Image: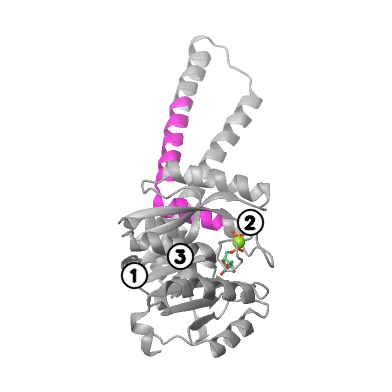
């Protein structure tokens, strides 16, 4: 505890049902951290795991005073788990890493080296991804490309949250109040000197993914909505184009009715246009709704997470 003030390296590891990977993860992390400094801390966040993860973490914390755990009262999601780690960590350099060994701990010394060269953010860029379903690969690829096009901040393509950050970055992240966290976007938004180290992303070694399709979709929407007004602008433009088209249509119909005296019989065209406009209106309302629901969450301003128990000192 005494050394907490001058921790050199903090490693933040969100845990959701990772009981099988924890022993190997701990071992590999210890080896890698030891290459950098003796003064490190591991902060495991148990995000409402339903398996034995919590027990494994508390056991580790008993045998190793550098192991801290934060036990959430329920599952709050990956980004919130990492946020809790950022709130509690004390290191000069802070690493975020997945628990499933898809992010190789062995890369951490490389990240640290770049940090020592003077970069405030060193993110790990996936050069290759192994053993993931084509669905995940394709959706991830499409998502990152869309994100790149619609956002104004430069969020690096093909990077996850596996990265090393300077204390400064962590302090700014703590000041950012948004409820729907999209950390990689927030970090890109902050600026400073950022660089990357490439790596091959392995397949998950133990257990299975905690990111359901639903969670992935929410996460993707958070990314786009927090960093871009493009969806709103798009529906406005869509509305304008459609209004213009329908105006031309109205003129054409009126001309036919009054001047040419040929009233067009057209149930089909009628139903098609009704459905078309109905669809556009619903989409537009939905898009606005997405923004409003996120605003609502920020106005409610509930605590981001609830800690059931922890062995970290409560700070602030
Ligand atoms: N995770 C979490 N809460 C969740 C889902 C996942 O803390 O609700 C953790 C998980 O234990 C892992 C990291 O977030 O350490 C990445 O999750 P996962 O490997 O399931 O995602 P994927 O790599 O499939 O995108
Ligand atoms: Mg994974």
The outermost residue toward the front is: 35
* Residue stretch in magenta: 217-245
The residue where tag 3 is placed is 109
Quadrant of the picture in which ligand 2 is shown: bottom right
The residue where tag 2 is placed is 213
Secondary structure of residue under mark 2 = helix
Say which quadrant the N terminus sits in: bottom left
- Spatial CA span between label 1 and label 3: 17 Å
- Where's residue 232, x and y in %? 42, 45
Is residue 304 visible to us here? no
Is residue 121 visible to us here? yes
- Where's residue 76, x and y in %? 54, 71
Residues packed near mark 3 inside 10 Å, few (<14), some (14 to 19) or many (20 plus): some
Specify the principal SS of the magenta part.
helix
The residue where tag 1 is placed is 167
Q: Is residue 69 above or below residue 112?
A: below
Tell whether circle 1 marks a residue whose Cβ is less than 8 angstroms from ligand 1.
no
């Amino acid at each position: 505890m005494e050394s907490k003030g001058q921790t050199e390296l903090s490693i933040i590891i969100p845990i959701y049902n990772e009981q099988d990977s924890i022993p190997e993860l701990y071992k590999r992390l210890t080896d890698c951290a030891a290459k950098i400094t003796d003064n490190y801390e591991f902060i495991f966040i148990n995000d409402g795991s339903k398996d034995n993860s919590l027990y494994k973490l508390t056991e580790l914390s008993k045998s190793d005073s550098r192991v801290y755990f934060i036990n959430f009262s329920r599952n709050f999601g990956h980004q919130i788990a990492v946020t809790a780690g950022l709130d509690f960590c004390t290191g000069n350099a802070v690493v975020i890493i997945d628990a499933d060994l898809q992010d190789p701990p062995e890369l951490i010394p490389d990240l640290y080296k770049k940090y020592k060269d003077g970069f405030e953010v060193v993110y790990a860029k996936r050069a290759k991804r192994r053993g993931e379903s084509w669905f995940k690969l394709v959706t991830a690829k499409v998502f990152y490309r869309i994100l790149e096009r619609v956002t104004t901040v430069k969020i690096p393509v093909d990077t996850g949250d596996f990265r090393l950050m300077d204390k400064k970055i962590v302090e700014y992240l703590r000041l950012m109040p948004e409820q729907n966290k999209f950390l990689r976007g927030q970090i890109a938004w902050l600026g400073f000197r950022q660089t990357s180290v490439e790596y091959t992303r392995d397949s998950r070694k133990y257990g299975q993914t905690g990111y359901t399709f639903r969670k992935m979709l929410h996460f993707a929407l958070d990314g786009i909505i927090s960093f871009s007004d493009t969806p709103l602008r798009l529906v406005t433009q869509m509305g304008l184009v459609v209004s213009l088209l329908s105006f031309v249509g109205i003129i054409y119909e009126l001309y036919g009715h009054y001047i040419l005296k040929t009233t067009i019989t057209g149930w089909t065209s009628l139903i098609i246009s009704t459905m078309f406009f109905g669809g556009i209106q619903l989409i537009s309302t939905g898009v606005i709704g997405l923004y409003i629901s996120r605003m609502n969450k920020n106005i409610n301003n509930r605590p981001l997470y609830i800690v059931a128990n922890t062995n970290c000192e409560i700070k602030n």
